[in-house]
Amino acid sequence: MADRRLQVFHTVARLLSFTKAAETLHMTQPAVTFQVRQLEEYFNTRLFDRTHNRISLTEAGARVYEYSDKIFELYGEMENAVREMTGEISGSLTIGASTTIAEYMLPALLGDFRAKYPDVSIHLKVSNTDGIVSMVENNTIDLGVVEAPVSNKNLVVDECRRDKLVAILPPGHPKADLSKITLNELLEYPFICREEGSGTREVINEYMNNTKDCQSCMDVAMELGSPEAVKGAVEAGMGISVVSNATIQKELRLGTLVAIELDPVLERPFSFVHQKQKFRVRVMEELLDFARAYCQAHREV
């Protein structure tokens, strides 16, 4: 039996979606459907029930999925054992990152990792924090890197570093000369914020809820989907915002934005998140070790 057919079936069965399986495997949906049909022909039975655009495992499909899970776990253990003997690091990983991390932290980290391990293939998916956590929960990515706390206790969360958030204003703003700014002072002005589901938005909302004596409400002028869009709106004088200090270094050098520390200070974790597993392929372990060391060496915010 061809390993590829079983791998494709296992992915479809795990996600219960041909579309999501095709995306995860970097295949077209017709190719995924073809592989599953070949496996059904091999066993001479249906493995999925397909009704109203939804799929479920048949009794035979559930049995094949149970055994395929064990097979791929053994494959992984075998690969790890051989890699440890030979010292070879290779393979493929799919990483998901929230927008801020994908744009400002991961390029350098992954560039250094690929320079050290050129035989490793890495695919990157970008979404907001909620989207990345959902991908980890559904096993559509191997590792997520997020910028807000993760509530799912069934996932492993490993903090990488702390990230400081600061208020940003256009030069010439009435508050631009302050060394620190309180929440009440900040909320006197129209606020440019990220979309719902963004880690940055979640952390700011929690900061507001936990700040004593905050009498003001957020006057949301715009909701935008990326740090670059938020910065552009603030530069254009459409409001003020709170963003990661790591995202504004270029603008501070050019003098197009002013950054002011929040009072009280606002920090958040950048964290790795992944499924709890009895084993992980060696390339995953190597990436986690490399990323932890990288974060220790770049802890400044």
Image: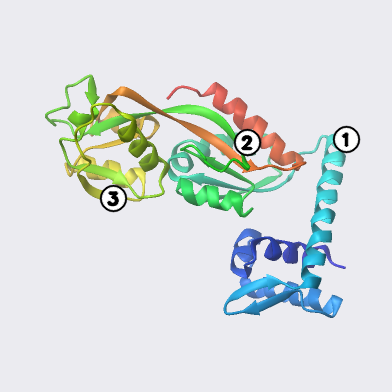
| Residue 112, placed above or below residue 41 | above
**Pointer 3: residues within 10 angstroms few (<14), some, or many (20+)?**
some
Q: Which residue is pictured at 29% across the width and 29% down the height?
A: 252
Residue 113 is labelled as 2
Residue of label 1: 85
Q: Amino acid at mark 3?
A: Glu
Q: Is residue 236 left or right of residue 294?
A: left
Q: Amino acid at mark 2?
A: Phe
Residue 107 is labelled as none
Q: Is residue 134 left or right of residue 165?
A: right
Residue of label 3: 223
- SS of the residue at dot 1? helix
Q: CA distance from mark 2 to mark 1?
A: 21 Å
| Residue 70, placed above or below residue 38 | above
From the viewer's side, name the closer residue of 25 and 66.
66
Q: CA distance from mark 1 to mark 3?
A: 52 Å
User: Which of disc 3 and disc 1 is earlier in sequence?
Assistant: 1
Residue 35 occupies quadrant: bottom right
Q: Which residue is pictured at 87% across the width and 68% down the height?
A: 1
* Image x and y of residue 289, in percent: 67, 30
Q: Which residue is pictured at 26% across the width and 33% down the height?
A: 168
Q: CA distance from mark 2 to mark 3?
A: 35 Å
* Image x and y of residue 87, in percent: 82, 34
Residue 15 occupies quadrant: bottom right
Q: Is residue 172 left or right of residue 64?
A: left
Q: Which residue is pictured at 34% across the width and 39% down the height?
A: 205
